[in-house]
Image: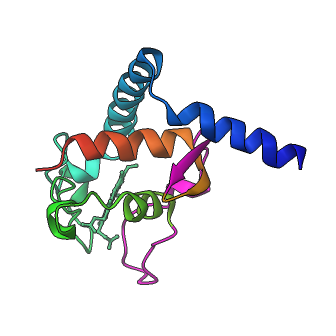
């Protein structure tokens, strides 16, 4: 019961968006950008428009990550992006070249509320997904 009350408090306090929270979401996106450049740009391109240098020799060309919303009826497919980075949506195909980042350290866990559900998500994973959302065409 106490745990439920604490969780409700956390959800309640994150619902309102104060200037500090806006500031923290900006720094989050900057961190996401940095993490993207460190972990993803080699394959998906510095501008996320696909096929960076490391794609040479891969069985599958790393796709552009700027058309994820366009390919999903104009809605950013956050869960799919989080799942793909984490490795949940990993193809069983042994030639799938997309590394499974969930196997490494993705930072401290934060609670993400979506559609009335609260999910624990590693902060670095969320930062990258939020950064990619800002790049959508
Ligand atoms: C070694 C190269 C490589 C690296 C590094 C890499 N990816 Fe990928 N990624 C791929 C390939 C290849 C695919 C195509 C799907 C597959 O694995 O068959 C892909 C697919 C994806 C998709 C699905 C795109 C779609 O249109 O369905 C997303 C999202 C994605 N990657 C995000 C990322 C992010 C974010 C990072 C960094 C944390 C990252 N990738 C790092 C190679 C890579």
Residue at far bottom of view: 93
Residue at the image position 40 percent from the left and 35 percent from the top:
35
Residue at the image position 23 percent from the left and 40 percent from the top:
134
- Please name the predominant secondary structure of the magenta segment in the image: loop
Above or below, comparing residue 65 to residue 12 in the picture: below
Q: How far across and how far down the image is residue 44, in percent? A: 23, 52
Q: Is residue 108 visible?
A: no
Q: How far across and how far down the image is residue 17, in percent? A: 44, 27
Is 103 positioned to the left or the right of 82 in the image? Answer: right
Q: Is residue 17 visible?
A: yes
Tell whether position 85 is magenta.
no
Residue at far left of view: 137
Residue at the image position 15 percent from the left and 59 percent from the top:
67
Q: Quadrant of residue 91?
A: bottom left
Q: Quadrant of residue 105?
A: top right
Q: How far across and how far down the image is residue 84, in percent? A: 42, 64
Q: Nearer the viewer, residue 81 or 115?
A: 115
Above or below, comparing residue 39 to residue 89 in the picture: above
Q: Quadrant of residue 82?
A: bottom left
Above or below, comparing residue 23 to residue 15 in the picture: above
Is 103 positioned to the left or the right of 31 in the image? Answer: right
Residue at far right of view: 1
Tell whether position 112 is magenta.
yes
Magenta-drawn segment: 88-114
Figure coloring: rainbow
Q: How far across and how far down the image is residue 30, in percent? A: 34, 26
Q: Nearer the viewer, residue 39 or 21?
A: 21
Is 93 positioned to the left or the right of 108 in the image? Answer: left
Is 57 positioned to the left or the right of 93 in the image? Answer: left
Q: Nearer the viewer, residue 71 or 14?
A: 14
Residue at the image position 60 percent from the left and 31 percent from the top:
13
Query: Ligand 1 is in which quadrant of the figure?
Result: bottom left
């Amino acid at each position: 019961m106490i745990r439920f009350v604490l969780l409700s408090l956390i959800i309640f306090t994150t619902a309102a968006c104060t200037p500090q929270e806006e500031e923290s979401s900006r720094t989050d996106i900057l961190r996401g950008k940095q993490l993207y450049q460190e972990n993803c740009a080699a394959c998906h391109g510095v501008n996320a428009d696909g096929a960076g240098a490391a794609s040479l020799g891969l069985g599958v060309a790393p796709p552009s990550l700027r058309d994820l919303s366009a390919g999903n009826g104009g809605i950013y497919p956050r869960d799919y992006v989080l799942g793909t980075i984490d490795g949940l949506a990993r193809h069983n195909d042994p030639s799938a070249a997309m590394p499974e980042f969930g196997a490494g350290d993705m930072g401290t866990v934060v609670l993400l509320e979506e559609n009335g559900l609260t999910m624990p998500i590693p902060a670095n994973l969320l930062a990258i997904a939020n950064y990619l959302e800002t790049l959508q065409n």
